Image (spheres, rainbow, N blue to C red):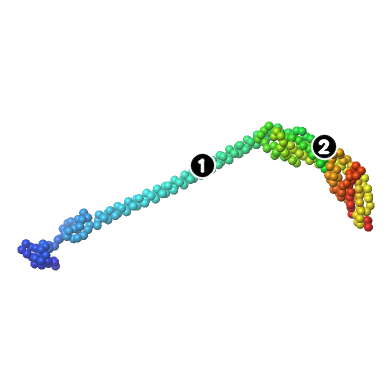
């Protein structure tokens, strides 16, 4: 039922409100219910929601596109960084291989030069000490020099032997001296001229209970030799059959060096 606004006047207006009379609006049967202009309809008081929905879909599509671009850029950046890192690592390995090859080649070339230089090395000034070092041993010295600066002459000194007394002998000591030369020192332990021995053994009888006393003179002791060192290092086998590396004690009297042994003898009561 239509809404009544009261009685109508002569001009058709409502006598109470003064408004025009209400006329029902019938939408056309062959047209849309809403006009697609997004504006408020004066009779129905509603809004057209089609355009905001389209705009919302467009905004969402733009957002998806933006996210896709950002993700694609990030993936591309990561892939590019990985590819660059792998390429750089491969290049570094190539550099390391080339450097190692160059180092090995340089080392081989240096060793070849050193080997040529070693062929020129020789000992000179071989000389024995005027004194014996100990029983059967004399000290010898010689100098080593080279015009090649690539050699470590101290190391070369220790590695270069001499032939003496029927055998090869390496230096016991190497020292730098003037003019870049190296002084090598040998201890020859089978030196015939330094072989001392004991003369006749005198049995001095019992020294104390269970001990016997022997004495002998040291022979072939050269002038200038250390008589005490030569005495202490000269071995012998006593008349009782016991071998001794050195005497019990040494002494000098009458211009001679004497060795004394105190040995076990249970015949001494």
Q: Nearer the viewer's eye, disc 2 or disc 1?
A: 2
Percent x, y of residue 27: 16, 59
Residue 142, horizontal then vertical, whole percent: 76, 35
- How many numbered marks, from 0 up? 2
Q: Is residue 221 above or below residue 267?
A: above
Decide: is 202 above or below 157: below
Q: Observer-nearest residue: 29 or 49?
A: 49
- The answer to which image quadrant residue 186 occupies is top right
* Label 2 environment density (alpha carbons within 10 Å; few <14, some 14–19, many ≥20): few
228 or 262, nearer to the observer:
228
Give percent across and percent down for residue 249.
Answer: 87, 49
Q: Which mark is residue 148?
A: none
Q: Quadrant of residue 145?
A: top right
Describe the element under mark 2 as helix, strand or loop: strand
The structure residue drawn at horizontal position 74% and vertical position 35%, both measured from the top left corner, is 143
Q: Position of residue 21 (x, y in %)?
A: 10, 63
- The residue sitting at 82% across, 39% down in the picture is 131
Q: Secondary structure at mark 1?
A: helix
> In this image, 148 relative to 90: left or right?
right
- Quarter that holds the N terminus: bottom left
Residue 191 in view in this figure: no
Which of 75 and 176 lies nearest the eye of the viewer? 176
Residue in the image at 77% along x and 33% along y: 125
Residue at numbered disc 1 = 91
| Mark 2 lies on residue | 130
The Cα atoms of the two marked residues, 2 and 1, are separated by 68 Å
**Residue at image coords 53%, 43%:** 93
Residue 65 shown left or right of residue 121 in the figure:
left
């Amino acid at each position: 039922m239509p809404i009544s606004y009261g009685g109508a006047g002569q001009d058709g207006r409502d006598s109470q409100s003064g408004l025009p009379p209400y006329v029902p609006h019938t939408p056309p049967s062959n047209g849309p219910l809403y006009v697609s202009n997004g504006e408020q309809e004066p009779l129905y008081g509603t809004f057209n929601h089609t355009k905001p929905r389209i705009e919302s879909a467009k905004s969402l599509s733009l957002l998806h596109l933006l996210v896709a671009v950002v993700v694609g850029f990030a993936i591309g950046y990561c892939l590019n960084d990985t590819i660059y890192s792998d390429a750089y690592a491969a290049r570094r390995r190539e550099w390391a291989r080339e450097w190692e090859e160059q180092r090995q080649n340089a080392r081989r070339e240096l060793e070849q030069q050193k080997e040529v230089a070693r062929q020129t090395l020789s000992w000179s000034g071989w000389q024995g000490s005027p004194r014996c070092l100990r029983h059967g041993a004399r000290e010898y010295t010689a100098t080593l020099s080279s015009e090649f600066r690539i050699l470590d002459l101290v190391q070369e000194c220790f590695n270069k032997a001499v032939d003496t007394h029927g055998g090869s002998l390496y230096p016991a000591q190497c020292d730098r001296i003037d003019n870049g030369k190296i002084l090598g020192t040998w201890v020859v332990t089978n030196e015939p001229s330094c072989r001392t021995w004991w003369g006749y053994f005198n049995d001095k009888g019992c020294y104390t209970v269970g001990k016997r006393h022997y004495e002998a003179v040291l022979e072939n002791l050269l002038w200038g030799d250390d008589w005490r060192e030569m005495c202490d290092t000269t071995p012998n086998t006593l008349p009782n059959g016991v071998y001794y590396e050195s005497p019990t004690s040494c002494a000098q009297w009458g211009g001679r060096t004497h060795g004394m042994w105190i040995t076990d003898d249970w015949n001494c009561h």
